[in-house]
Image: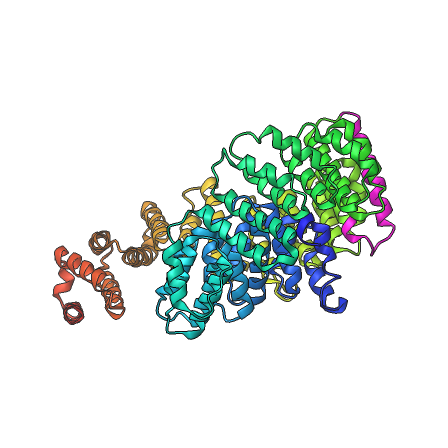
Amino acid sequence: MRATYGICLPLLILSFSTSALSQEDIAPAADAVVQGTSEFEFARRILTGRAFPVDVRRDAAVLLLQRAWPQGTKALADILTDTADPQGRLAVAGALAETLPKLGTLPEDFIDPLISALSAKDEKLRQTAALAVANYSHLVLPQLGRIILQPAAGTSEDTRLAAVAAVQRIKDKASAKILIEALDDQNVQLSTRCREGLEHLTGIRFGQSNAAWRAWWQQYKDKELAQWLQLYILALDSQNLQLRTRVGLLAEQLSKQIEFRWLSAQDKPRLLEELLTNPLEDVRLQGLTLSRSLFQPGPFPAHLQERLRQMVADESAPVRALAAELLRDLRDKQLGNLILARLPEETDPRVRASFAHALGYVGAGEVVQPLIDLLADPSPLVVAGAASALGNLASSKDLGPARAAIVNALLVRYDKTALTNGADATLRGEILSAMVRVGSPAFRSAFVRALQDSSALTRARAVEGLRTLPADNRRKETLAAVQLLLADPDRGVRLEVLRTIEALGAPDQLPILEVRLDPKVELDPNVRQEVWRIVMQLLAKADLKTLTAWQQKISDDDPEHQTQVLSHLERRLSESDSTSPDLIAVREKLGDCLSRLGRWQPATGKYGLAYDQALALSNPDNTEILGRLALKLLDALLHQGDFQQSVAHIKDISASLQLEQEALGTALDYLQTLLDSKNAESAAELISALNAAALPGLGRKPLKQRFAQCKARFRNLQ
């Protein structure tokens, strides 16, 4: 299932049944991920699902690497650095060890996480990480050398041994230099591993003689890389005489792979041609994998593209499948005809699936009927590939009358799988995915029926299908149908329903969503968080009455959501009556919430607006409100660190509101907080600002005494 064919979504699902766990063990975990999400999301959730066996998670990681999704790199790196998930780290490291040698361009995002994994407690993870990181060759040798020769404080001997295991796999003179320099290390085991590493690196055996190795180094250290590679290949050949021919060819493959990375862009096509015409299947596959590195920049060499076309009829099924995949990615204009000619005699279902998938990118109207015919193939892999291709064609090209044929064929094939509810769940999901991309209103009834399917994958795809249908006057009908699945046992299905409400909903959906905010109703905190996000989006469209009601419903212990609702309420009030006294209260409460969240700058802004508005009303009854707002504004200014403005504000409210004592008390309270936290720099600035202002209140008891005590504490702090 791994290796040459590549990992695809159906094969990844198949790995559930071949894992070491029983069906009873793995079914709950599988149901939690087979939710009908995108192929990327599907693989990501398997990768992060700790209930899955490490082999299944490794297959998911391989899929993420092979597809080269930009977000896939981050998902893999996050797992690789998660020390709380050792099995996940092992899965990713194993996938990297397996896949990196086949990639033309190595993503450098994994270098630091792999180096870090060399320090893991688990020996298998350390060794797997060493195997993977060695693929980065000269990019990692300096770091590995420092771990071995100049270990930082706290570096374990196991980490250094893992670094040796990585270095010995890097066919480079610098590798030999590192191992030679470490031969006399005080750690006997590390010294022994270095000798073994040199034997592995060179094929030469000197037993336990460090002196012999140093003498050898003096003789060979100035030789060119090509001589090193030749030395290595000859050593392998001499040690495996009984398999001389095959070992020689495989050694040549290794040599050429290493050589390929060092060659200039002009010289790489020559080496690739040798690999692609090699009699060994493994070598040809290696050549196909390395061919991707020539996709960019510039055009792919014409003679190599012609060789890829020939390989569509290669004797090896994995080679045929991979050649078709490469030509598909090159959008080869001849590939469609090549596949159509080859399909009648192609018997391998995995190759037929690869062919079908490719037709969706390189074909047009002429491939529609052959793909429709493949929907009747006995292999689910082939049917899934054909459905995907038809969906891609219908969504990206103007097919005229052929589009109607695609719609009808997908409906018929889906109905056939729907008759076996409980079986072929993956295939139903794949066909529905194609129907989603086509987006025909004719699929509405099928999507609605699929909402009742026993498979979570199918239900989720059906919800997505209804959401993405062309806009019509059936919004309420669609929402009514999918809302029933807000209580679906599958988390992925519930999230799809929420996305549909987000896309099609209006504030009239808020009462339904409010129910899902109850932890007793929606047990998953991540789903509740998504509900909150959508609620806030819908509240942006709500009227004053609805916003006021929601503001009162949200607890004061939840300042984050209070802030969001109050912001909507402030905007709506400003639009209706910017002089409304209610706006003062909303802005004050908004300032309170922002203060509790430590967002002092926006809090200052809200308090300032409320204070200015209250001043403008010139209402004698506002005196108490003004005083309260004035002190809150002062507190926010102080926390913001704007001490000059704070002092100016104290002067202002001392004169206008006779609040000098209260204001200075607030300032001294904050000064004491700075001193308690030993923030000498800020304390000095505030003391300086207060001294410069020469405020009368600081010359009278008890404020004078408090200020003197603060200054004494400050001097002691210095």
Task: Please tell me which residue is depicted at 16% across the width and 62% down the height of the picture.
Answer: 697
Instruction: In the rendered view, tell whether residue 709 sits above or below residue 487.
Output: below
The residue segment tinted magenta is 400-427
Q: Quadrant of the C terminus?
A: bottom left
Q: Is residue 316 left or right of residue 422?
A: left
Q: Is residue 417 visible?
A: yes
Task: Please tell me which residue is depicted at 34% across the width and 64% down the height of the picture.
Answer: 150
In the rendered image, residue 434, in percent from the top left (x then y), is placed at: 74, 41
Structure colour scheme = rainbow
Q: Quadrant of the N terminus?
A: bottom right
In the rendered image, residue 710, in percent from the top left (x then y), is placed at: 18, 69
Please name whichever residue, 56 or 286, is drawn nearer the observer in this view of the structure.
Answer: 286
Task: Please tell me which residue is depicted at 44% across the width and 42% down the height of the picture.
Answer: 574
Q: Is residue 661 left or right of residue 605?
A: left
The quadrant holding residue 90 is bottom right
Membership of 326 in magenta stretch: no
Please name whichever residue, 664 or 60, is drawn nearer the observer in this view of the structure.
Answer: 60
Instruction: In the rendered view, tell whether residue 133 sits above or below residue 157.
Output: above
Question: Magenta region, mostly helix, strand or loop?
Answer: helix
Membership of 420 in magenta stretch: yes
How many dots with numbers? 0
